[in-house]
Amino acid sequence: MTFATDRAAVGGRRVLHSIPAIVQITVTAVAAYAIAHFGLGHAQPLIAAIVAISALGFVRDARPVRVLETVVAMTLGIALAEVLLIVFGAGLVQYAVALALTLAVARFLTGNAAFAIAAAVQCSLVMLMPAPDGGPFVRTLDALVGGATALLATALVPRDPLRTARREGRRLLDEHVAVLGLLAESMRSGDALQAGRALERARATGPLVDAWRDAVESGTAIARVSPFLGRARFDLARQRDMVASLDLATRNLRVVARRAEWLLHDGGARPALADLDERIAVGIGFLADSLREVGSVTIARASFAEVLRHLDPERMLPQGPAADRVAAHAVRPYLVDLLTATGMPIDEARALLP
């Protein structure tokens, strides 16, 4: 029952997050079909709806240039297939030649594998389905209608890219907090296995950085062309700077976790280092809050700065193994990167180092 409940909760969240995309795709597909059917008089402009749906899709990167690439690929496949259908006629051999030629042309034009597959799918539809009424290149015209409608939808029916970027940023920052929490527990108990689990999670953060960066870049591109997202441009620009700093911070988090895992092989507790990890985690919580409440970035900056000012490993850990002080030193560049994520210039952040 618990497993089923969890699956239902995950599915519900996925649907909730997809509502803007569902609305955008539905409106666009219906509009493309209606334009081709009622405006151009095409009896069954299936291709118009298919191109609109495929060009938008559920992908995170919904920037206009990606939509345009998909539209061009699909239109290319349709146009090539219609030319070959007129010249050579229908048949299995003709289909094989058309499909191979479409794939070859698409691969020549771009190294994007998805581009070639999109062109091939549309080629298959044209070659294998009965030709509609209206003469040659009706389906090519439908593809252009669907593509133009999809491009227009990215500006007029946007998906709230700011919310998507905030969600991806929050996922990354929450993972930083989780890793630091595991490190603090391992340092307090001297448990090397716990530190190993923290290291595994830290090593798995790369896709979270990429997802946030893609969401910010896609949102920025959409905001440039949409008349409804002008207010989002400032937040997306701020997040773009944050992603660059958090990318470096995430790399340094792996170094911190690796040092901790190696340090705890002796089984000894390090309460001072546990306190350090916990204090940093509190600051990252405020940094995550700043994605929605800009004022929280000031609190995060002050929190990181206070920790960094007093992070002198020789004074903090005057006794004990030298490896303890080395582990504390590894935290210093991590904190500098976190400070730059709050908007502090890197020279100012480094100047706080004792």
Image: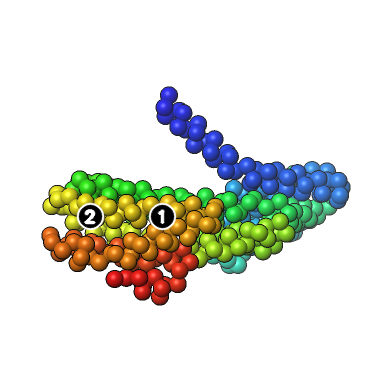
Location of residue 119 by image quarter: bottom right
Q: Amino acid at mark 1?
A: Ile
Horizontal relation, residue 210 to residue 157: left or right: left
Residue at image location 57% in from the left, 43% down from the top: 17
User: Label 2 belongs to which residue?
Assistant: 272
SS for dot 2: helix
Mark 2 residue type: Ala
Write the residue at 49% across / 37% down: 10
| Mark 1, secondary structure of its residue | helix
Quadrant placement of the C terminus: bottom left
Q: Nearer the viewer, residue 243 or 33?
A: 243
Q: Residues within 10 Å of mark 1 (few under 14, many from 20)?
A: many
Q: Nearer the viewer, residue 269 or 123?
A: 269
Position of 275 with respect to 347 (left or right) is left
Could you tell me residue 304's position as x and y percent? 38, 61
Residue 347 appears in the picture as rendered? yes
Q: Which residue is mark 1?
A: 284
CA gap, disc 2 and disc 1 = 19 Å
Q: How is the rendered protein coloured?
A: rainbow
Q: Position of residue 290 (x, y in %)?
A: 50, 55
Task: Tell which tag, 2 or 1, sits nearer the viewer.
Answer: 2
What's the residue at 63%, 42% (across, down)? 19
Horizontal and vertical percent position of residue 202 = 34, 54
Left/right of residue 154 with respect to residue 7 in the rendered view: right
Residue 261, image x, y percentages: 22, 54
Q: Is residue 7 above or below residue 33?
A: above
